[in-house]
Amino acid sequence: MSRCLSLEAQRLAPYTPGEQPQDQQYIKLNTNESPYPPSPKAVEAVRSAEAEKLYLYSDPLCAGLNCALAKRYGLKPENVISGNGSDEILAFAFRAFCGTAIPVAFADITYGFYEAQAALFGLDALRVPLREDFSLRVEDYMEFPGTIVLANPNAPTGMTIAPLEICRLLEKNSNRVIIVDEAYVDFGGESCAPLIPKYDNLLVVQTMSKSRSLAGGRIGYALGNAELIADLNRVKYSFNPYNVNRLSLAAGTAAVEDEDYFQGCCAAVRETRVWTVNALENLGFTVLPSSANFVFAKPDRLSGGELYRRLKENGILVRWFDKDRIRDYLRITIGSRAQMEALVEKLTELLKK
Amino acid sequence: MSRCLSLEAQRLAPYTPGEQPQDQQYIKLNTNESPYPPSPKAVEAVRSAEAEKLYLYSDPLCAGLNCALAKRYGLKPENVISGNGSDEILAFAFRAFCGTAIPVAFADITYGFYEAQAALFGLDALRVPLREDFSLRVEDYMEFPGTIVLANPNAPTGMTIAPLEICRLLEKNSNRVIIVDEAYVDFGGESCAPLIPKYDNLLVVQTMSKSRSLAGGRIGYALGNAELIADLNRVKYSFNPYNVNRLSLAAGTAAVEDEDYFQGCCAAVRETRVWTVNALENLGFTVLPSSANFVFAKPDRLSGGELYRRLKENGILVRWFDKDRIRDYLRITIGSRAQMEALVEKLTELLKK
C-alpha cells in the first residue's frame, strides 16, 4: 500500500478469484468454466476478418450484441446492456442502485464479489444468513429497505429460489431494485427474465462465461426495464464508454444466435452433474441440491481444506473457501465426463487412505 | 432516470464518446484511431487457436502482457498493470489516488473523461485554465495538495509538456501522485516512463488504441512504482478481476513485441501530420503545434460547429466540442494520406463558397 492510497481505497475488500495457473496442466474444476469450447460460430466470428478491424473502436452501444440478446429473451434492445463480464455489470448496478441512502442486502453465503462491491462503493451492507440447510427464504428480506442482490442459483451452493418467491419481494416494495444474478441459471434454474415486462424494479444479470463457453471473452449483460438499463448506461459512460471489445462483441453475438449448440452444452453438463452427484454420494459426500454447473459437497472424512490440498497435489483443482459455515465443503465444477471420472477415481483413492 | 437511481449516480457526468456510426461509410477522423491495421503479428495471435480457448478465463494477472510491456519499457512486471482500455486504468487510478481527502486537478481544456471520473468518485476537482496560447504551465499546479492529472500530449490540443517540467511537480511534493496520461505520446511527445525508477509518485498511463492500432481491442496500461501498481490492483480486484479478455491479451502482447511495425506506423502518422498542417495553414487555418495523431485547427471563416456539420454532410467526420475557449476549433485525426487529401479537397471546396 503506497502512502498515496486514498482512504476509500484503503477500505476496499478486493475479491480473490480462483487460482488460474498458467504454467501447469491441472484438471481444472475450480472456476466453473465450461468444459466445452465456444460455439463453432463464435470461433468463426472471431476468425473472420474481425482482427484486422481492431484499429477501429468497438461500438460503445454494443448494438449488435444487445439486439441479439433482446431477440433471444423476447425483449427490446433498450432492455439490455452488455459489459466486460457480469462483474462489470454488477459494479454498474451497485453504483446505480446503491449509495449512502440505499443500503444493500445479500446472503451471508453467496458470490464473494458482492462484498467487494459493497466496499468499493462504501455501502451499508446487510448480510442475511441462509437458513440452516443453506436455503434462502425471501421472508428474511421482505422488510429490507434497500437493494437486494440474489444469486439464483446461488454460489457456491448451487441452490435455487423460485421466481414466484422473488415476485413476492418485487411486489412488496416496488421502490427497491431486486438484482437477480443468474450466472448459472442455464444449467437448471428458472430465469426471472420473463418477469421483466411485469416488474420495473427487476434487474436480471447473466454471463456468457459459463453456459456460453466464453469465460475468456468477458461478456456479461443485464436485462431489465428500459429505465433501469438507462441508469446502468449512465454509470457505464462515466466509467468506461467502450467497455466491450470488438472480438468479444462478435463472439458473443454469434454465441447467442447458436441456440442449438448452447442447449447441447447445457444438457451435457446436467447429465454429467447427475452422474457426479451419484458418484460423490457413493463416496460418502453430502451434496447440496445443485442447479448449477458445479456441486457443493462435504466429504464424510478429511476436512474440506485437507481434501482440497490433496487433490491439488494430485493435479486436480477445486475451490475451497476458508470461511465459516462452508469450511467443510468443496465447490467442484462439472467438467467433462472424463474429467469427473478422473476426479472420482482420485477421490476414491484419497478417501480410502 | 428511474426512481431507484442512487443520489451518487444522479450526480454523474457521463462522458460522450465521439460518434461511432456503424451503418454508413464516413471518412472517420473524429476519434483518433490509427488509419493502419494492427501489426500482422497481433492479427495472427488472435487467429491462432486462441478463439477455441475462450471457454477458459483469461489470466487475471495479465502476466504475459505485463511482461512484454515491462521489457519494452525497461521496467519490471510489478511496475505494470493492464486494463480494459486506458479509461479503465484511469478509473482505477482516480479511485486509488483520489478521495474525499485527496482532491484532483486537471486542465480546463483536456480529455473530458477526467470530468466524468471526478463525478463518479464525488471528488473535489480543480480545473486549472490553460494559458491563453493553450500551453500548460506547471507553476499553476505547484501548490496543489492533491492528485494531478496531465494529458501529455494534451487532448484536444496536441500540445506537450516537457518531462523536465513534470519533474518539478514530482519533486515539489512527493506525497501527491502525478498521473501522466500519455495516450498520444508515441506520435512525437516525450514519455515520462524513463523517470519511473526515480519518482515513486509518478504514474504513466498509456493505451494501445492509437499508436498500436488496437482501439477495438481495448487495452490500456499504467507504468509506475510497484507500490502504486499494487494500489491499482487493489482497485482492480474490487471492480473487475478478469478485466482483460484472452484475445486482447494475445493481440496486445504481439503488438508490443512488434517494435518495427509500431515505429513504422508512428512515422507514417507524423509524416502525414506535417503534410496536413501545411495544407490546413494554406487554407487559412490556425493550427496548434501538435505532437499527437490529430491536429486542433481553427478555420479563418465559418464557425467550428458550422464547418463540422458541413464536413459531416459531405461524408467526413471530425470532432467538434461545443465548449468555451475551443468552440472555434476542430479536432481532426490524422488518417491515411489519401484520407487527408480527401479532407483538404473538401475543405477547399467548402471554404471557397
Image (cartoon, coloured by chain):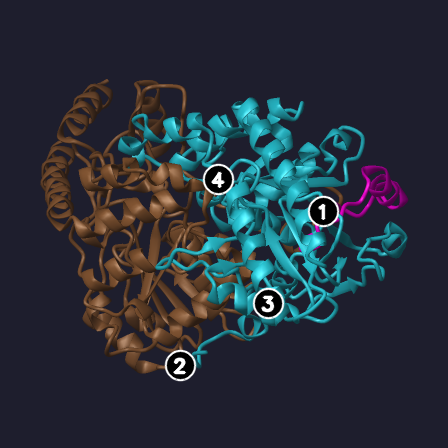
Chain colours: A brown, B cyan
Q: Secondary structure at mark 1?
A: loop
Query: Image quarter for residue A166?
Result: bottom left
Q: Where B108 sits versus B228, above or below? A: below
Question: A136 or B84: nearer the eye?
Answer: B84
Q: Quadrant of the C terminus of chain B?
A: bottom right
Q: Nearer the viewer, mark 2 or mark 4?
A: 4
Question: B96 or A129: nearer the eye?
Answer: B96
What chain is tagged by disc 2?
A: A
Q: Which residues are magenta?
A: B155-179
Question: A337 or A280: nearer the eye?
Answer: A337
Q: In the rendered structure, does residue B326 fall within the stretch colored magenta?
A: no
**Position of residue A175 measured from the top left corner of the image (x, y, whole percent):** 40, 81
Query: Image quarter for residue B322?
Result: bottom right
What chain is tagged by disc 1?
A: B
Q: Which residue is mark 1?
A: B290
- Residue at mark 2 shares a chain with residue at mark 1: no
* Residue A130 visible, this angle: no
Mark 1 and mark 3 lie on one chain; the one further toward the N terminus is: 1
How many angstroms separate mark 2 from mark 4 (CA)?
43 Å
Circles 2, 3 touching at the beta carbon (< 8 Å): no
Q: Nearer the viewer, mark 4 or mark 3?
A: 3
- Residue at mark 4 shares a chain with residue at mark 3: yes
Under mark 1, the amino acid is: Ser
Under mark 2, the amino acid is: Asn
- Disc number placed over residue B214 in the picture, else none: 4
Under mark 4, the amino acid is: Leu
Q: Which residue is mark 2?
A: A175
Q: Secondary structure at mark 3?
A: helix
How many angstroms separate mark 4 from mark 3 (CA)?
29 Å
